[in-house]
Amino acid sequence: MYFSRIIFSVCLALTTCSVAAIELTDSLHSLVLDAKQVLTLDNTADFTATTVSDVETERLGPNSIAVYAPENAGFYSLVLSNNKTSKRLLVIVKKPFNANNKQLNNYQIGLYPAPYKGYPQYGAPNGFIEIFEKDLTRQLTPHVQVKNVICKQVSGFPKYLYVNNDGLMMLEDLLRFVQNEGIKVSKFAFISGYRTPHYNRSIGNGKHSRHQYGDAFDLYIDEDGDGRMDDLNGDGKLTIADVDVLYKVFEKFQKHSRYNGGIGRYKPASHHGGFVHIDNRGFTARW
């Protein structure tokens, strides 16, 4: 391990190695990593890992820390601190997956299609987050639990989830933006998060649905707890007009943030209220 770290540091100095990096920000609460992946965590000039952390780290330079993902899939804790505050990150190590397979530990995944128009962001995941029943209420971020984003297909445990780092950070940044726009919301309600290709096909959705790639969510606001979109425009009715209010705020969010993707509006139906889809596919789409 020590020798590999030396090689890693030399590669960084020579800029000959491609190393995943992410910046420590207020919206970063989880790190989704491959087994034994080395991640560069930037913007950490005055932070050090505390002894209660479950993962190993190494200072790379004045502003960066290397995070060494454990070998085994699971949930781990990384606590960083400085002389003012501490920040706890949930380090999530995925279970490796061969995209040519249709199942993982008897859980139906299905086959991922060839990437849409060759876009790399439509590549099949190389691993999934392993979920047991006790994990359903685990907080992925302060406002998102595993049960909010896990696929709805019926199965026993373990189940498998895919969500990426940008997807989770987008949800936190989006919530803060909606609140700042004056809409009363403590957390989003979810219609859908991740979908396996198997489940996506079973409900008749398009084969390149962004829900299969870890950064797409169908959201609504339900502060009164009735399971349907709140009366956001204040006309005393629950209609598509409430969806339009949220849709326009989501559009404004993408224009003022680093996220770029699809936004779609869905009117109320007999089995669900209205909701808005948002994703981070990397190019603009509207419906």
Image (cartoon, rainbow, N blue to C red):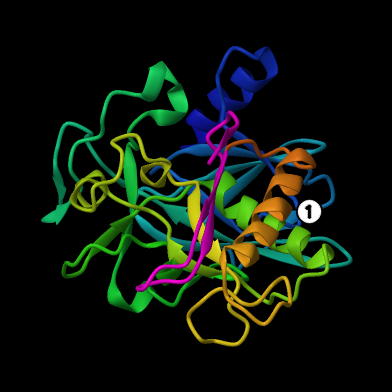
Label 1 environment density (alpha carbons within 10 Å; few <14, some 14–19, many ≥20): many
Observer-nearest of 38 and 167: 167
Q: Work out whether 46 lies above or below 143.
A: above
| Kind of residue sitting beneath label 1 | Phe
In x, y percent, where is residue 45?
Answer: 83, 45
Tell me: 75 left or right of 127.
Answer: right
Magenta region: which residues?
262-287
In x, y percent, where is residue 8?
Answer: 56, 26
Q: Residue at x 19, y 67 (%)?
A: 154
In x, y percent, where is residue 84?
Answer: 88, 66
Tell me: 66 left or right of 199.
Answer: right
Q: Residue at x 38, y 50 (%)?
A: 162
Q: Work out whether 218 lies above or below 254.
A: below
Q: Is residue 207 visible?
A: yes
**For residue 118, what is the image quadrant?**
top left
Residue 122 painted magenta: no
> Mark 1 — residue?
47
Observer-nearest of 225 and 274: 274
Residue 276 painted magenta: yes
Tell me: 171 left or right of 181.
Answer: left
Q: Is residue 54 visible?
A: no
Q: Work out whether 281 lies above or below 150.
A: above
Q: Work out whether 237 lies above or below 22.
A: below
Q: Residue at x 78, y 53 (%)?
A: 47
**For residue 62, what is the image quadrant?**
top right
SS assignment at label 1: loop
